[in-house]
Structure formats: C-alpha cells, structure tokens
Image (cartoon, rainbow, N blue to C red):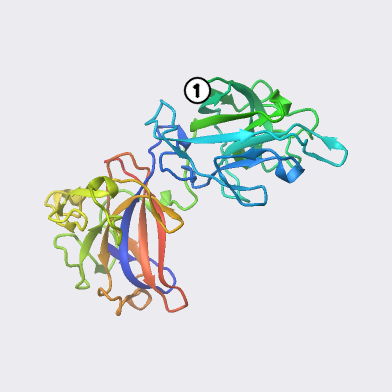
Amino acid sequence: MILAGTRSSWLVKALLVCIAAATMATAQTAVIGDCENGTNQNNFGAYWYVYTDFEDGGNSEISNADPNGDGTYEFTVTEGEGCPSGTAGYGARMDYTLGDTDPGSGSVTWGSSAGVGTMLALEGEVCDITGAETITYWAKADPPVDIRVEIATSVVEDFCYHHTIHSIGSSWEKFTITLSEPLGIQQYSWGEEVAFDPTKVEKVQWAISEDEGATENSSGSIWIDDVKIQPYTFVPADACESCVSAPGAVPGDFLLADMEETQNGLGYYTYCYNDVGERSVSSPEDYSEIFEGVDNDDPEIPILILDGGEGYDNTEGAYIGFQLGPTYQEGSNTILPFVGIGTNLADELGLSPFNAQAAGAPGVDFMYKTTGDYEYVALEVETDQDFGNPGAVYYVKLPATEG
C-alpha cells in the first residue's frame, strides 16, 4: 500500500478496505432489488416504498407500514415473504385497503389506488438504462388482482407513466416488462404523449387501482421480489471503475505497508474488524464472522495474521475469509453487515494523525483481490480534519475482482 497522488489537505487516522452486504449480478443482468438485506434499501442504493392516493384526496390505506401522518409511510421489506427464485428470505409485501373516496383534481376524478415501488435513483435523480430490453420480477397476490406496472421517467410530468398491465395470481410467478413501445410499455390516452426516455428512469412501481378493475373498500396483499433489469450493468455513482488497473509497480516515495509484517511504515498496525462493535452477541449467527487469516481465540475480536502466499506475487498479505451476518439495529438505524481490513496512520487515541498534505502524498495506491458474491468493496479513509469535520469517513467503491 503506497501513498501517492494529489488531493486536498487531510489528517488521516486510518485506511480501511471494507466489504459490506451486496448481491453479485450475473453478466448483463442487474438486480434492482432482491430485498435480502432486510431493509428498504435496494441494490441500486435507492429505496423501496409504498404509497396511496392520499395527496389527491383519496383515503386508501396501507396497514403493514407506519404512517407519517402526511400520506407517506415508513416501509421495510418483510422476513419470510421472499419468492422461491432466491433464498425466499425477504420480500416487499404490501397490505392494502382501497378507499371509498375518489381522488381527483378539480372536477376530474379517478379510481382509488395504492402501490409499492422501488427507486432506480435517489429522489430528484435519474438512472440511465440505455440498452436494457426487459425488467423482470416475481409477484403473487391475495386475492388475485390486475396491477398496473409503471416505469416512471422524469420526462413525464402528468403522472401518465409508461406502463403495462399484469394479472397477478395467488402463487409466485415471474413476469416480464418489455421496454419498448407500443407492444411492451405504453401510455394512457388521457396524458401528454411522450416518448419513453431510458436515460431518465426514476422508479418502477406496482399500482392496485379501481382503474384496473379493483373495487372500492377492497382489501388484500401483494408481494414483489427479485426485480432485475437486462441486459444492463449497474455502476453506482460512488464507485470508481477507472481507479483500477492491472497490478504492478506503482510510482511513489513512501511504502506505507507491504503486509510482510503487521507493523506498517509509520510504526502503527494493520488489523481486521467485524461488525460486533459494542453489541452483545451470543453466537456467530448474530454477527459477521471472520474465520480465516486470523487468530480466532475470540471470534468476536479477530486478530489478523499475515499469511505467506496470500499477497501479490505469492508474498505475505492481509487476507480474511468470512461469512457476513444479519442486519442489526443501532437505535432507529438498521445497519448492514460488514467486515474489513485496515491499517492505522495514527496511534490508538488518534492524537497524532498523519498529515497527508505535508507529506506531499494524499492519494493511496494498493493491490487487492476478492472472491465471493460481492460486486464492490469500499476503500475508506478515516480522517481527523482541521477544517471542521473530525472523525469523518470518506470512501470510494471499487469493483470486486472475483479472484
């Protein structure tokens, strides 16, 4: 690991390579959401959500999400409700009751509705899916119901989104949305006709509505899972594909750590860590376990052992074998499981952080490889900055090497 490059002034306390919960996509297939992290965050870094006709004057309700009082809901995916194509662990389930007050605007009204969706980008942003041909998903409903599947884009300003209609039965079934007009997706005649723009996609949502044959005061449940888009390769906005090149000699004046010993070039130490932290855990099933490349006398606090042959070109290197654990709660926050390897650039108290600017080397070069079903690892830089943000952790995602 070599310090190099040019960046702004940082006082650096630690460098860490962290692996967190993620799902590996197959070639040319991107998983938008499989719900398996147990939260409402999907694989594109955006979110699952539910909605009703409240803002338009309707009174439809969703009973398995917490209302915020303004027509929005706090929603999370449900354990044990996933589809059989995956692990059947988590799925997006919505329990709804359509209202008996028609929503509308002025003298125009329309049918009551409720829906569940997943975003392809954060609020106010868009996702470019140019080249994608289909979106697939698994679904079931109780009772069976016709739903409107909408592909929302920012170029549509009157909510007349491109859509298709699917009949959802009582057993899990895989459905396909063809992203072409007019045989696949189309618009209703009541809206402004706008060509589908794959560079401006915001979300996919599944609506149950009187307009598609549901009746007022009707109640039921719908399950959605394993939403995928193909052919498509998703690259997160916080990932850096261009940061990675073939291994070899790297220009730089200061070798921070060659992993031949745990003590690095600054006199501090390389280590590994898991997500136990201050939590009280009773078994390995409660946390992310590191079981290779460590002294495991206390699995909750693994001690890194540098292994011969695990480094670049068969030298010693920092290596861990692990199994990610479940998500867990810290107050009101749901934390995704993680493990990592780090090297300190300051003492344990952080009293003498490394001044990267003064050293003339505020960039980092290092060699790494990964195996397993993880698309990205995160390089994290923990800092103690002198311009008002002490203890900040900055990061960039780097693509997994798959061996």
Vertical position of residue 148 compared to residue 293: above or below? above
Quarter of the figure with residue 341? bottom left
Classify the position of the N terminus by image quarter: bottom left
From the viewer's perspective, tell me whether residue 264 is left or right of residue 168.
Answer: left
Q: Is residue 209 above or below residue 365?
A: above
Q: Nearer the viewer, residue 128 or 153?
A: 153
Point 29% across, 60% down: residue: 277
Amino acid on which the number 1 mark rests in the picture: Lys
Q: Which of these two is toward me, 320 or 110?
A: 110
Left or right: residue 351 compared with residue 166? left
Q: Position of residue 206 (x, y in %)?
A: 61, 32
Could you classify mark 1 by the number of other residues whose Cα lies within 10 Å: few (under 14), some (14-19), or many (20 or more)? Answer: some
Q: Secondary structure at mark 1?
A: strand
Q: 168 above or below 28? A: above
Residue at point 52%, 20% (across, down)? 170
Residue 310 in picture, x, y percent from top left: 16, 49
Is residue 43 in sight in this rendering? yes
| Nearest to the observer: residue 367 or residue 11 | 11
Residue 371 appears left or right of 224 = left
Give how far across and how far down residue 16 sits, in percent. 31, 60
Q: Say left or right for 390 vs 133.
A: left
Position in image of residue 322 (x %, y %): 24, 46
Q: How many marks?
A: 1
Residue picked out by circle 1: 174
Placement of 311 over or under 167, stated as above or below: below
| The C terminus sits in image quarter | top left
Q: 385 or 368: which is nearer to us?
A: 385
Work out whether residue 229 can be spotted: no
What residue is at 67 percent from the left and 51 percent from the top?
Answer: 70
Q: Quadrant of residue 181?
A: top right
